[in-house]
Image: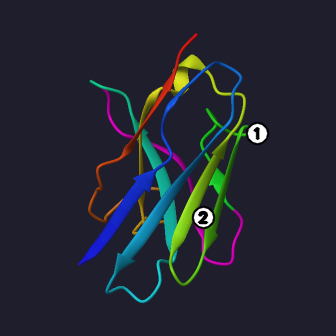
Amino acid sequence: QVHFVESGGRLVHPGDSLKLSCAASGTISGFFRMGWFRQVSGKERELVGYIVDGGAPVYADSVKGRATISRERAPEKMHLQMNSLQLEDTAVYYCNGIVDQWGRAHGPWGQGTMVTVSA
């Protein structure tokens, strides 16, 4: 069993910065590729970006230049730093530690953390 718990979401204003965190646990000995996803109500969940263990992060075009993904080992944690937040960044943000090379998640979903960008 693996679990992912997201935190850090809150109400912010356009232009603000925010850091989300993800705590991963489970029986998998390390998570090779971990990713952040987000979902707006009524829309499909979309990839924000992912990071490979020991590699450089990959970002969706919608957040490129504004997002930074980092991770820690033992315990497994991953962070998403978002700068210059826009109204369109409003969504529930999820992390997943089982992500394939095409950015698709295969692990269980946690509760997510809500980010609201509002003027």
Image coordinates for residue 54, horizontal then vertical, percent: 68, 78
Q: Is residue 104 above or below residue 18?
A: below
Amino acid type, mark 2: Ile
Residue at 30% in and 25% down:
41
Residue at 62% in and 21% down:
86
Q: Is residue 24 above or below residue 90?
A: below
Residue lying at the far left in this picture: please name it.
1
In the image, residue 46 lies in the stretch drawn in magenta: yes
Viewer-closest of 105 and 82: 82
Q: Quadrant of the N terminus?
A: bottom left
The figure's colour scheme reads rainbow
Question: Magenta residues, as a range?
Answer: 43-56
Q: Secondary structure at mark 2?
A: strand
In the image, residue 13 lies in the stretch drawn in magenta: no
64 with respect to 74 (left or right) = right
Residue at 72% in and 28% down:
84
Q: Secondary structure at mark 1?
A: loop
Image coordinates for residue 64, horizontal then vertical, percent: 70, 40
Viewer-closest of 60 and 11: 11
Image coordinates for residue 29, horizontal then vertical, percent: 42, 89
Residue topped by disc 1:
65
Q: Which mark is residue 11?
A: none
100 with respect to 83 (left or right) = left
96 with respect to 11 (left or right) = left
Q: Is residue 106 above or below residue 55?
A: above
Residue topped by disc 2:
51
Image coordinates for residue 52, horizontal then vertical, percent: 60, 71
